Image (cartoon, grey):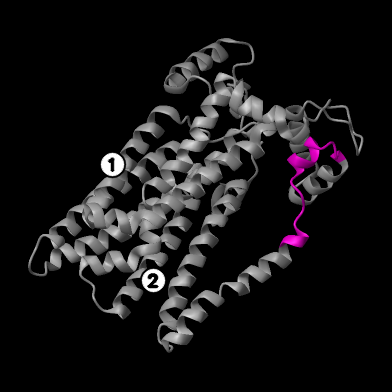
Amino acid sequence: MLKKTKIWGFDINITFVILYLVQVFINSGILLGYVSNYAFSKLPTNLGWRFMLGIGAIPSVFLALVVIGMPESPRWLVMQGRLGEARKVLDKTSDSKEESQQRLSDIKEAAGIPQDCNDDIVQVQKQSHGEGVWKELLIYPTPSVRHILVCGIGIHFFQQASGIDAVVLYSPRIFEKAGITSSNDKLLATVAVGFTKTVFILVATFLLDRIGRRPLLLSSVGGMVLSLATLGFGLTMIDHSDEKLPWAVALSIAMVLAYVAFFSIGMGPITWVYSSEIFPLKLRAQGTSMGVAVNRVTSGVISTTFILLYKAITIGGSFFLFAGVATVGWLFFYACLPETRGRTLEDMEVLFGSFFKWRSALKDEQRKSAGGDNGGQIQMGTKAQE
């Protein structure tokens, strides 16, 4: 059962609120970075850039200290046979003893541990260095695992390949190409980018469980495509004009803000929520780590090649390219990604496996379930939500 809580009158899944808070704090950090850069730009050059780089050490030290007190993941503890420690962590992070026992029961079932086993330490079957897991994930995957892996890696790839880090890291250059020449104005415009990202990530927190992953993701990526294409058009018009075009400047600035808003309301946070909930327990660590690796590698490629890219095909052309990539991403999400709202981590493997035909498979299973004796209780291996 998914844990929900009341926030400002809304029933919200607390698990995904926590996942969203990661994105909230990342975007808040980006915003603080923009604001501090603007403040330090007033200092002499030999001091300003040193403060810009050095200020990041303060939260890093704080993070290193608080990580010491973090509890271990109960899922990982169960996989290691340390049920007693897992039970203590779940007791601390659940609203009631009954909820803690239910969550532990779900994890034990996925790990293949008998429900009547209540020992603090149990023997579990382990593969040295995770060799069995990697074989099941990459060499001999079932259709459902293959589908999950493609979706988990694909959503991470398209998140970064659509150019978000190019906008975040090089927004001063983009605003300069758009016609903003004052250093002060460019830094203020980057603050607006950070503020927009932070505001819309907060808005998304209240939409995820009310709308669902697919509708929010498809709407977000669709908005990104439109804003990227319009941004490319505005920058191209500026590049090919001998005189300043105020409307094109305003359009380009507005589209940068629209792009980060559309990204933050769906594509940004849903990538992490979706990829964290689809992998079955025994493959979760390796599967999600592959997705994150693809995410970071793609981010690095985009970040390091963006200047070369826009010099080769113009600044407007680069955003037309990103719009094309985002369009391919939208088609991929529409065809391959099932809705996962209301599903537990242990149920995800049943939902996947038919790729483009997942809708038909879902309808067939629902019809069979509706005709059976237990149709109102279990559908597609998913526990009925209260």
Determine which quarter of the picture holds residue 371.
Answer: top right
* Residue 259 appears in view: yes
Residue type for callout 2: Val
Instruction: Give the residue at x 49% y 77%.
Output: 52
| Residue 172 inside the magenta-drawn segment | no
Rendered position, 143 above or below 166: above
Q: Which region is colored magenta? A: 67-83
Give the x, y percent position of residue 381.
62, 22
Q: Residues within 10 Å of mark 2 (few under 14, many from 20)?
A: many
Give the x, y percent position of residue 141.
60, 22
In the image, farthest residue toward the bottom? 44
Regarding mark 2 in the picture, which secondary structure is present there?
helix
Determine which quarter of the picture holds residue 273.
Answer: top right
Give the x, y percent position of residue 3.
65, 43
In the image, farthest residue toward the left? 242
Residue that numbered label 2 is attached to: 191
- Measured in 3D between alpha carbons, the distance from the residue under mark 1 to the one under mark 2, in whole angstroms, is 27 Å
Instruction: Give the residue at x 91% y 37%.
Output: 121
Residue that numbered label 1 is attached to: 324
Regarding mark 1 in the picture, which secondary structure is present there?
helix
Q: Residues within 10 Å of mark 1 (few under 14, many from 20)?
A: some
Instruction: Give the residue at x 58% y 21%.
Output: 380
Rendered position, 47 above or below 208: below
